[in-house]
Amino acid sequence: MAGLGTYCCSTFSSKSLRTSPLEFKSLTHRGGTVVGNPIRRRGLAIRAEVNYVSAEEAKELIAEGYTVLDVRDKSQFDRAHIKSCYHVPLFIENEDNDFGTIVKRTLHNNFSGLFFGLPFTKPNPEFVQSVKSQFSLGSKLLLVCQEGLRSTAAANKLEETGFQNLACIVSGLQTVKPGTLDSVGSTELQDAGKAGLITIQGKISAVLGTVLVCAYLFITFFPDQAEKLFQLAPTS
């Protein structure tokens, strides 16, 4: 149609979608006039991957400059922890006094607490903020716990917050052999999760095992003396 210019659509975008959130959509007249409005695009987020390592590989990471962040509860941390590490528990002891919590805490202490020495805990609401107050998002952090579950959960929380250089020990400190990592505490790292009656049971089993071994050796090497002892034993 005469008197009307012919229009065509063209798109101008940045060289990289990762670095620019804007794309321009414009109408270009043959005479050279450009009329356009920016269209907002969502940037492409690049998420870091958590690095899962063995105890030996963890030792190498520490030598390379990774900082150890222990996320276990205070009781396990006090029993044994890696030397010069930071402690920010993912769970803290639940001391709430509402009726429901009191009932749950009582049941827990009578079973898990008594037999396994596990404290009654709840998620630490200040965990992420506490870590961010001590470390920058670019810090190299090796997260550790006793079994590997809490460190994985903690790493996921920190990764979502923006931390990029995160690592965890597969299956936790229970897999660390004595002497592999410098530690502080009253026990070995792999035994820091053991408490309560289970430790007493373990000691009793060790004593009984020693007695049985000694009895077997005595009967084997001194059969005559052993027979005399059996004869002296009272019979029903």
Image (cartoon, rainbow, N blue to C red):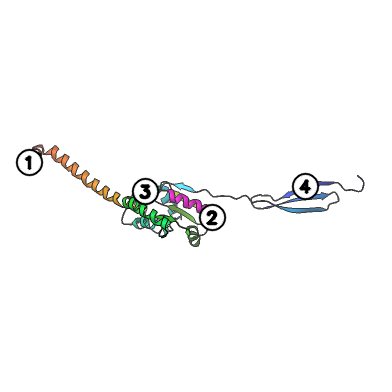
Q: Is residue 154 magenta?
A: yes
Rendered image: mark on residue 174: 3
Rendered image: mark on residue 10: 4
What is the x, y in percent for residue 65? 46, 55
Tags 4 and 1 touching, CB below 8 Å:
no
The kind of residue on which mark 2 rests is: Thr
What is the x, y in percent for residue 47? 56, 50
Earlier sequence position, callout 4 versus callout 1: 4
The kind of residue on which mark 4 rests is: Ser
Q: Nearer the viewer, residue 165 or 133?
A: 133
Q: Which residue does the numbered mark 1 point to in the structure image? A: 232
What is the x, y in percent for residue 139? 50, 57
Earlier sequence position, callout 2 versus callout 4: 4
Q: Nearer the viewer, residue 25 or 53?
A: 25
Tell me the mark number nearer the camera, choosing from 4 and 1: 1
**Is any atom of residue 10 visible in this view?**
yes
Tags 2 and 4 touching, CB below 8 Å:
no
Q: Secondary structure at mark 1?
A: helix
Image-based side of 37 in relation to 131, left or right:
right
Rendered image: mark on residue 51: none
The kind of residue on which mark 1 rests is: Leu
What is the x, y in percent for residue 232? 7, 41
Rendered image: mark on residue 161: 2
Q: Looking at this view, name the residue that lies furthest to the front.
A: 99
The kind of residue on which mark 3 rests is: Gln
Q: Main secondary structure of the magenta part?
A: helix
Q: Which residues are magenta?
A: 148-161
